[in-house]
């Protein structure tokens, strides 16, 4: 007993240190998210030029020390335009993620908690919507409502909602059949109290990680719509609009396509990494 005590005493801090330690992937993701947050809130702190200043003598210059990301067809600094376009791109991604999560909560809760007929109808609706490809459903909504930032938010949010609704339904059903809910029923708690204090909080908690994943995914889908000419129209500096504008100059200035695409991928990867880390942390907490 005396020989085992020192080992146990030294093992616990080591485990604690491992739990608090952040890997390099998470640190890079947090650094990228912090950079994009600054660009969204105060792009003038990061921009090196006026994003709307044109200089046709400097048109289609490749990346250099003066223009880090090169210039576009009008001689505007691409790095500054990317920095100023961060706010609109993030707002579209956050808005679409919020719309998709809210729709998912409503549909998932109805499918899991209603009577047999209503729950069955809601479940069939979720399956029908889930059968449509996200981009195809978004294209249909954009074709009906017309291209705009608001339409992008609705189209991407509605197109992404069915997959999240299935997750919400599964989480609610799992929480409803859990031991702590059965104990609350045995103690005579009301249905409203069981729903508000036990089922919904435990079912919605995993959505924190899903929301972080959804932001990056929504930005990718919104940029895809803009690349097809169904998003915010140029001369906006929204990232999808930059892709759309640079498509006509892909041979003369490939950086007009490559660099905004890399920026979108970096933000999507950072949001995905953060979401997975939050998910793993929640799963460890449950265990």
Image (cartoon, grey):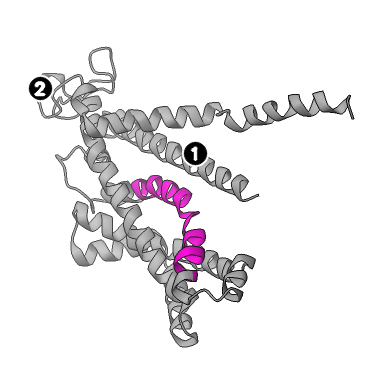
Q: Is residue 168 shown in magenta?
A: no
- Above or below residue 110? Residue 271 is above
**Which x, y percent locates residue 78?**
23, 27
- Residue 273, labelled with which disc? 1
* Residue 108 image offset from top left, x and y in percent: 45, 69
Q: Along the horizontal axis of the image, is 181 left or right of 248?
A: right
Q: Would residue 207 be counted in the magenta stretch?
A: yes
Q: Quadrant of residue 39?
A: top left
Q: Secondary structure at mark 1?
A: helix
Q: Nearer the viewer, residue 217 or 277?
A: 277
For this view, does 202 lie left or right of residue 135? Answer: right
- Marks 2 and 1 in Cβ contact (< 8 Å): no
Residue stretch in magenta: 194-220
Q: Residues within 10 Å of mark 2 (few under 14, many from 20)?
A: some
In front: label 2 or label 1 = 1
- Most frequent secondary structure within the magenta stretch: helix
Q: CA distance from mark 2 to mark 1?
A: 39 Å
* Residue farthest top in this picture: 65
User: Compared to 133, does 228 lie above or below?
Assistant: above
Name the mark on residue 55. Answer: 2
For the N terminus, the image quarter is top right
Residue at image x 9%, y 26%?
54
Q: Is residue 260 visible?
A: yes
Q: Farthest residue toward the bottom? A: 117
Q: Is residue 35 left or right of residue 84?
A: right
User: Which mark, by number, is residue 100?
Assistant: none
**Can you give x and y, in whole percent of width and height, for residue 10 in the image?**
74, 24
Q: Earlier in the sequence, mark 2 or mark 1?
A: 2
Q: Nearer the viewer, residue 109 or 154?
A: 109
**Residue 241 seen:** no
Across and down, in percent, residue 13 comes to 68, 26
């Amino acid at each position: 007993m005396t020989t085992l005590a020192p080992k146990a005493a030294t093992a616990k801090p080591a485990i604690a240190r491992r739990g608090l330690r952040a890997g390099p992937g998470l640190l890079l993701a947090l650094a990228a998210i912090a950079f994009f947050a600054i660009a969204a809130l105060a792009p003038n702190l990061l921009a090196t030029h006026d994003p709307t200043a044109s200089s046709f003598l400097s048109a289609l210059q490749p990346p250099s020390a003066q223009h880090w990301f090169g210039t576009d067809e009008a001689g505007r600094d691409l790095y500054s335009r990317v920095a100023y376009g961060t706010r609109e791109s993030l707002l579209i991604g956050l808005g679409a993620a919020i719309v998709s999560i809210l729709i998912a909560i409503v549909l998932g809760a109805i499918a899991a908690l209603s009577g047999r007929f209503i729950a069955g109808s809601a479940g069939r609706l979720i399956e029908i919507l889930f059968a449509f490809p996200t981009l195809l459903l978004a294209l249909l909504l954009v074709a009906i409502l017309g291209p705009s930032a608001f339409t992008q938010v609705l189209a991407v949010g509605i197109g992404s909602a069915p997959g999240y609704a299935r997750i919400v339904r599964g989480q609610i059903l799992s929480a409803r059949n859990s031991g702590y809910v059965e104990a609350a029923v045995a103690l005579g708690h009301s249905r409203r109290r069981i729903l508000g204090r036990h089922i919904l909080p435990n079912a919605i908690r995993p959505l924190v990680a899903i929301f972080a994943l959804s932001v990056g995914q929504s930005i990718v889908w919104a940029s895809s719509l803009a690349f097809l000419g169904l998003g915010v129209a140029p001369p906006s500096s929204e990232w999808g609009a930059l892709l759309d504008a640079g498509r006509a100059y892909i041979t003369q200035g490939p950086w007009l396509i490559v660099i905004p695409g890399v920026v979108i991928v970096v933000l999507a990867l950072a949001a995905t990494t953060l979401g997975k880390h939050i998910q793993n942390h929640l799963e460890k907490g449950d265990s």
